[in-house]
């Protein structure tokens, strides 16, 4: 009986016992014996299906729990567009204030700040953007994925 587990062995024993009893009692009890055996098979199938359903539900719950814990990507087109608009809107008054108070050095400081904030945002949303490694052939890693 290679390839059979204990439940298969038990079911085979039940079938053998049912056939033995049928031989002893005769054909008039055949229907009741078959019904009894089929009920045991049905219970076995129900148990197997129930275990599989429980296992799949547990796997689905684990997947949902992992997805809920993992951070959502925030690099949407709308976020990038909004960030760019806000940067430009804030750059205008910062330029006026920096240029009006300190002249050209003030203007440079204002724009260095605007560019710095945008570089940090780009690095946050695209972690490998500024640290690309080059292969011996000179190709970027990002193009080989």
Image: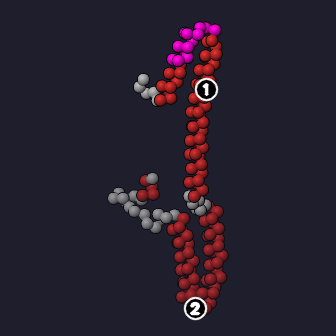
Residue for point 55% across, 80% down? 113
Q: Give the number of the disc on residue 102.
A: 2
Up-down relation of residue 132 to residue 60 (above or below): below
Crowding at dot 1, Cα within 10 Å, few <14 / some 14-19 / many 20+, comes out as few
Is residue 61 or residue 121 the one in the foreground? 61
Tell me the element at label 2.
helix
- What is the distance, in whole Å, between disc 2 and disc 1 at their CAs? 87 Å
**Image quadrant of residue 97?**
bottom right
**Image quadrant of residue 92?**
bottom right
**Image quadrant of residue 80?**
bottom right
Q: Can you give x and y, in whole percent of width and height, for residue 2 in the image?
A: 41, 25
Is residue 16 or residue 124 the one in the foreground? 16
Tell me the element at label 1.
helix
Task: Identify residue for label 1.
Answer: 42
Residue for point 65% across, 82% down? 93
Q: Can you give x and y, in whole percent of width and height, for residue 77 in the image?
A: 62, 61
Q: Can you give x and y, in whole percent of width and height, for residue 22 in the image?
A: 57, 12
- Image quadrant holding the N terminus, namely top left
Q: Can you give x and y, in whole percent of width and height, for residue 12 in the image?
A: 50, 21
Crowding at dot 2, Cα within 10 Å, few <14 / some 14-19 / many 20+, comes out as few
Residue for point 50% across, 29% down? 7
Choose the circle earlier in sequence order: 2 or 1. Answer: 1
Taking the magenta stretch, the answer to whether it contains residue 85 is: no
Q: Report the predominant secondary structure element of the magenta stretch.
A: helix
Q: Is residue 19 left or right of residue 138?
A: right
Q: Which residues are magenta?
A: 16-28
């Amino acid at each position: 009986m290679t390839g059979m587990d204990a439940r298969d062995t038990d079911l085979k024993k039940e079938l053998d016992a049912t056939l033995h009893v049928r031989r002893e009692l005769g054909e008039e009890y055949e229907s009741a014996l078959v019904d009894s055996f089929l009920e045991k098979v049905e219970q076995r199938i129900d148990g197997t299906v129930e275990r599989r359903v429980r296992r799949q539900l547990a796997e689905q719950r684990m997947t949902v729990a992992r997805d809920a814990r993992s951070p959502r990507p925030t690099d949407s087109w709308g976020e990038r567009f909004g960030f760019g608009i806000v940067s430009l809107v804030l750059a205008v008054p910062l330029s006026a204030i920096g240029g009006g108070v300190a002249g050209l050095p003030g203007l440079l400081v204002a724009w260095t700040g605007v560019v710095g904030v945008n570089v940090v945002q780009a690095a946050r949303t695209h972690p490998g953007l500024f640290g690309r490694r080059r292969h011996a052939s000179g190709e970027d890693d990002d193009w080989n994925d």
